Amino acid sequence: MSPAEHPTPPGTNDSPQASGPADDESGDAPATPDRAGPVPPAHPGPGPADVGVGGAPGAPGGGGAPGRPGGARERDEGAARWPGRAIRSASGGGGHRTPYALARLAERHARALHRDRRQRAEIAAVREEGRGRISRGRYGGLTVVAVYGAAGALAVVALVWTEWHGVRQAQAALAFGALIAVGEAIRCVEAPPALPGGGGGVPDPRGEPAPLAAAGALGYALLGRLGGEPASHGVLQAVAVVVAASLAGLVAPLAFGCPVDPGHTARRVLTAAFAAVCFQPLHRTGRLADWLGHGPSLVGYLLVLLALTALCDAVLAAALARARTGWPYGPLLRDELRSLPGVGAAVCATAAVMALTVAVAGLWPVPVLAVPLLLIQYSYRRYAGIRATYRQTIASLARSTEIAGYTPTGHAREVAGLSRAVGRELGLSEPRLTVLEYAALMHDIGQLSLVDPVPAGATEPLPAAEQRKIALLGGAVVRQTGVPAEVALVVERQADPYREQPLAARIVRAVNAYTELVSGPAAGGAAAGAAALRALERLRLATARDFDPVVVEALATVLSRGVYGRPR
C-alpha cells in the first residue's frame, strides 16, 4: 500500500517520512502493529547505523526528518505532556480516530516517558557522583593534613625540647637510633613490580615492612631501666630519637634514587609517641612498679600496650591509604589487621624482649636481637620477588589469547584490575584477591581451542552451551599451569548461573561482560559514559540468572569512584 492510499488525518505531523528509522529513538520501545490493516511502509532512508543518538539521520543530538523544524523528539515530548490534545489532533479534530494514529501516539508517549526517566536518572547519577568525589576529596585532604600535621608538630616540639635540655643517657639513644636508621635504610619502599603492560596486577599495597626500625622505635619508647639503673629519658626524647634516626635512615634511599614514603615515618613517630606516653610517665613516677611489680604482670602490660600500638598503626595506615586512593576504608583496614599476626607479632615480641633484656643486661643484646628481624626482612623480600615473578608468568600466559588474535589487546589486564577492585569492595581478603586476579587474567584462555575466533573476543553474546564449553576447556588448560586449584575452579564455573558459582566466578563474569559491552562490538561506537550506563543497565536486567545483583552494584560503585586503577 502506498502513502497515498493511507492518508494521514489532518492536524498531525505523522507522515511516513517522519516515522521511519529516525523515529525509533535508540530502540526505546518496539513498534506497535496496526490491527486494522497493514502499516504503511517506512520512507527509505538511512539504516540504523546511520541514525544518531537522538534518532535523526546523521545527527548526534536528535531531531526529526531532514529539513523539518520539529521531528520525532518534539512530537514525543508533546505527546507525553499533552496526551489529550495529541489525541484530538490525531483524530483530525473530530470523531474520526484511526487505530493506526492511536497506536503511534501511544508508542510515542511511552518512548517520551522512558526517555525522560532515563535522562532524570542520568542527571541524578552525575550529581551524586560529583558530591561523592567532593566529599571524598575533602576527607582525604583532611586525613593527610591531620596525620602529617600531628607528626610534624610533635617532631618539632620533641627536637626543640631535646636540644634545650640535652640528650640524657646518650649511649642508649645512640644505640637505638642506629638500629632505627639501619632498619629504615635497608627497607625498600618500592612494592613488588606490577604486571607487564601497566595494568591488571596490583602489587602488595603495604610495600615492604621495616621490622627492624619499628622494633627499635618501640623498644626505646618502652625502655624503663638500663643495665639495672632507671632510664632517665622521657617521652619527648624518645620521640626526638625516633624522628632523627628515621630521617637519617632516609638519606641512603634518596641517594640511590629510591622513592620514600613520608607516611611510614609519620606513622612511626605517632605510634612511638603513643607507646611512650602510655609507659614512661607511669614508670618514672613509680606507679607502674607499685601496681604491677617487675614480674609477669609487667610483661603482660607491655604486650597489651604493644597490641594497642599495632592497632593504632593499622588505623593510621588504612586512613592514609584511603586518602591516597579513594578505596573504601573497611577493606583497607581489614587488610592491615590481617597482616598483624605475621610481621606485626614478630615486631611487638622483639620490642618487648628488647626492652626487658636491656633493662637487665645493658646495651649488648640489642644487635643480637636485631638478627631475627633482619632475617625476616630478607625472607619477605625474597617472597615478594618470587610472587612478582609468578604473577608476571601468569600474565604472560594470559597474553597468549591476545597474541593469537582471539581477544583484544589489554583485555585480560583490564578485567583483572577491575575484578580485583570489585573484590576489594566486597571485602575479600588478600589471598582471595590473588586467586581472583589470576582467574581474571586467564578467564579467556579457553578460546584457544576455537577454530574460528569470536568477533572481538566477546563471549557474552554466545549461546550458554558454547560459553560453558569455552569455560571448561579454559579450566583444563589452567590446571596444567600449576596455579592453585581455586583458580581453575573459578575459570570453569564462570559460565554457570550465578547462584551456582563461587563469588570469584561471579565477579569475573560480571566484569568481563561489562568490559565487552563497553569496548566491544556491543558498544556500537557510543561515547564512553553512555556505553558504561548502557552496559550497567544490561547487567542489571540480567540479574535474574546470569549476574549477581550484589556484584553488579559493587561494580557500579567502583566505577563511580574511578579509582580502581590507582596504586596504593
Image (spheres, rainbow, N blue to C red):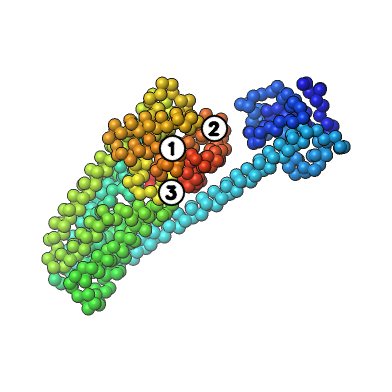
Q: Residue at x 28, y 62 (%)?
A: 307
Residue 389 picture location, percent across and down: 28, 37
Residue 261 picture location, percent across and down: 34, 50
Q: Which residue is mark 1?
A: 496
Nearer the observer, disc 1 or disc 2? 1
Q: Which residue is mark 3?
A: 425
Q: Nearer the viewer, residue 154 or 198?
A: 198
Q: Which residue is mark 2?
A: 523
Element marked by disc 3: helix
Q: Residue at x 54, y 32 (%)?
A: 523
The disc at residue 474 is none
Separation of residues labelled 1 and 2 (CA atoms)? 24 Å
In the image, residue 43 sits, relative to residue 122, either above or below, namely above
Residue 422 picture location, percent across and down: 43, 45
Q: Nearer the viewer, residue 289 or 266?
A: 289
The first of marks 3 and 2 along the sequence is 3
Q: Is residue 74 visible?
A: no
The first of marks 1 and 3 along the sequence is 3
Q: Residue at x 58, y 49 (%)?
A: 127
Residue 524 picture location, percent across and down: 56, 30
In the rendered structure, the answer to whether residue 547 lies left or right of residue 7 reads: left
Q: Residue at x 19, y 75 (%)?
A: 293
In the rendered structure, the answer to whether residue 524 lies left or right of residue 37 reads: left
- Which amino acid type is marked by label 3? Glu
- Which amino acid type is marked by label 1? Asp
Q: Which class describes the residues within 10 Å of circle 3: few (<14), some (14-19), or many (20+)? A: many
